[in-house]
């Protein structure tokens, strides 16, 4: 995992940091907004410190794909390239191995 700056240039205070997979961190780069592919409007990217994941995203295709369900979710999923082929295949293997999704009651 990478330590991600939610707002690039916003400093190293804990409220501006989160963990991100290398793909998401490198895809985001210095972006703080992205275009919602459905509406064509520029929206802020998902902020895991102030927003709930399940309000903006859902799992699809037996937990292999992440689908944005709001403008923020759709723009973030596209900007972060959350459904790159290699990542989707990896998630499918994790599902087959019983490693994904993580059971929230046992984590």
Image (cartoon, helix red, strand yellow):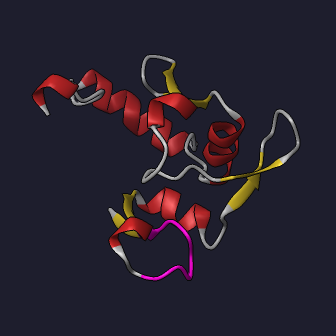
Q: Is residue 8 magenta?
A: yes
**Residue 57 visible in the current orientation:** no
Examine the residues drawn in magenta and state their main secondary structure: loop
**20 w.r.t. 77: above or below:** below
Of all residues, the one furthest to the left in this rendering is 106
Horizontal side of residue 66 vs 39, given as left or right: left
x and y, in percent, of residue 16 in the image: 44, 69
Q: Is residue 23 left or right of residue 18?
A: right
In the picture, measured across the screen, residue 64 lies left or right of residue 36, that is left
* Residue at image location 61% in from the left, 49% down from the top: 81
Quarter of the figure with the C terminus: top left
Question: Looking at the image, is 41 positioned above or below residue 99?
Answer: below
Rendering quarter of residue 33: bottom right
Image coordinates of residue 31 in percent, x first then y, are 66, 67
User: Which residue lies most toward the right here?
Assistant: 40
Q: Which residues are magenta?
A: 4-11
| Location of residue 84 by image quarter | top right
Which picture quadrant has residue 62?
A: top left
Residue 53 in sight from this viewpoint: yes
Nearer to the camera, 55 or 63 = 55
Q: Is residue 19 magenta?
A: no
- 93 left or right of 72? left
Expressed as whole percent of the image width and height from the top left, the position of residue 90 reads 39, 38
Locate residue 26, reporting x and y percent: 54, 67
Quadrant the N terminus occupies: bottom left
Q: How many marks?
A: 0
Q: What residue lies at 45% left-to-right and 38% top-to-bottom?
A: 52
In depth, the one of 26 and 97 nearer the eye is 26
Q: For this rendering, which residue is in front, 35 or 14? A: 14
The structure residue drawn at horizontal position 66% and vertical position 42%, both measured from the top left corner, is 72
Identify the residue at image location x=31%, y=24%.
Answer: 95
């Amino acid at each position: 995992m990478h330590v991600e700056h939610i707002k690039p240039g916003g400093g190293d205070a804990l409220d501006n940091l989160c963990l991100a997979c290398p793909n998401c961190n490198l895809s985001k780069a210095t972006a703080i907004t992205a275009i919602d592919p459905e509406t064509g409007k520029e929206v802020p990217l998902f902020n895991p410190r102030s927003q709930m994941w399940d309000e903006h995203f859902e799992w699809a295709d037996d937990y292999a794909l992440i689908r944005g369900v709001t403008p923020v979710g759709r723009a973030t999923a596209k900007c972060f390239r959350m459904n790159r082929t290699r990542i989707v295949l990896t998630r499918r293997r994790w599902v087959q191995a019983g490693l994904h999704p993580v059971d929230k009651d046992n984590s």
